[in-house]
Every structure is written in C-alpha cells, then in structure tokens.
Image (tube, rainbow, N blue to C red):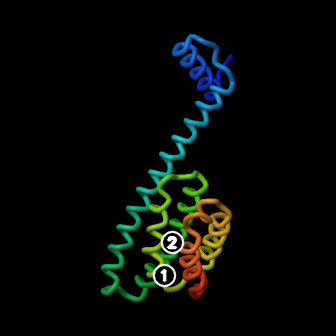
Amino acid sequence: MELTDRKKQILKIVVEGYVATAEPVGSKAIVNVLEIRDRIQKVAQLEKQLNLLKEATIMLNYNMQSQLSCSNGEMWEREKAYDSAFAAYNGAFRFAILAQSQNLAEYMAPLTRVVCHIQNIGTMQAELIAKDAEVIRNTDAYLQYFKKEYDNIINIVLSKPIRNE
C-alpha cells in the first residue's frame, strides 16, 4: 500500500506522540498538530510576502528619487508601477488580516507611503483594490484597528482618475 504525503504526515504525528507520551494518540491531538503546522506555514508565507513588499518599497523609493530626470514614457510606466504596487500591498494586507497576522501595522505602512504617489489608476487595479477592500472591511481587525485610516487611504486611491489600458 502506497502512503500519500498526508498519510505519512499523520503517521509521523501519531508515532512521535506515542513515543513522547507512551499513550495512544487520538484524532484531536492530530488535528491540533496539523492546525499548528498550518499556522506556522501561514506565518512563514506572511513573513516572506512582507520581505518582498519591503523590497518593492525600496525600489519604489528609488524610482521616486529618480523621477525628476525621466521622459514622459518612463513617467507613464512609473505611474502604472505605483497603482500596481498599491494593489499588491492591499492584497497582502487582505491576506495578512485573513491569516490573523500579529504584525498588521507592517502591512498597512506601505499603503500609506505609496498612496501619495498615485496620480491615476488603471481599471484592473481599481477593480482589484475595490474587491480586496470589500473583503478587508468585513474583518474584525479592520473594524477594531484600521477602519478610519484604511478608509481614508482607499477613498483617496479610488477617487483618482481612471486610466484606460
């Protein structure tokens, strides 16, 4: 009989639990271990995503510094980069809230930094941001901690002129 990865994982939990306690391991203990491992994976994904967002912020800051010496075509590309970056940050914030991250403020910070650089917004980005905002607005963390600040940011972004692409 071939064991799937999940069956191997469950067998490993049962054996480790039995060796550690010398008592039978029930389904409740298995579920608890699986939930903890799932949570650890989510936190690792959040940390990786946060690091990527920090790198993107550094690149955006560099672009802002060099904006004065660029052509109209380059300006157009940078404007598109800002609304795309905002959409990515907003998506990461939604993901962090849904995963119940402990460092939500770190996900909120890039939104506040990028919003002031958006001159206009692409149709697709506007739709994506609006959908993510709808999900965020239905969470407890939003209601308890970020309602006023987040609503101000989203209202600024979605009130920008729409850029047809």
Q: Relative to 121, say whether 134 is above or below.
A: above
Residue 67 vs residue 165: left or right? left
Quickly name the residue at label 2.
86
Which of the marked residues, 2 or 1, is nearer the chain's N terminus?
Answer: 2
Pick out the residue farthest to the front.
144
> Residue 3's spot in the image, x, y percent?
65, 22
- Looking at the picture, tell me which residue is in the foreground, 135 or 105: 105
Q: Relative to 118, say whether 128 is above or below.
A: above
Q: Residue at (68%, 63%) from the top-left corner?
A: 138
Q: Residue at (59%, 74%) from the top-left corner?
A: 125
Quarter residue 57 falls in: bottom left
Numbered badge on residue 151:
none
- Looking at the picture, tell me which residue is in the foreground, 24 or 10: 24
**Quick one: quadrant of the C terminus?**
bottom right
Q: Residue at (50%, 59%) from the top-left corner?
A: 104
What crowding class fits label 1: few (fewer than 14 Cα within 10 Å), some (14-19), or many (20 or more)?
A: many
Pick out the residue farthest to the top.
22
Residue flagged by tag 2: what amino acid is it? Answer: Phe
**Quick one: quadrant of the N terminus?**
top right
- Looking at the picture, tell me which residue is in the foreground, 44 or 121: 44
> Residue 101's spot in the image, x, y percent?
52, 52
Q: Relative to 18, say whether 77 is above or below.
A: below
Residue flagged by tag 1: what amino acid is it? Answer: Ile
What crowding class fits label 2: few (fewer than 14 Cα within 10 Å), some (14-19), or many (20 or more)?
A: many
- Numbered marks: total: 2
Q: Relative to 30, say whether 50 is above or below.
A: below
Numbered badge on residue 118:
1
Q: Secondary structure at mark 1?
A: loop
Q: CA distance from mark 2 to mark 1?
A: 9 Å
Q: Residue at (40%, 82%) from the top-left corner?
A: 74
Q: Secondary structure at mark 2?
A: helix
**Given contact means CB atoms under 8 Å apart, are the residues at marks 2 and 1 in contact?**
yes
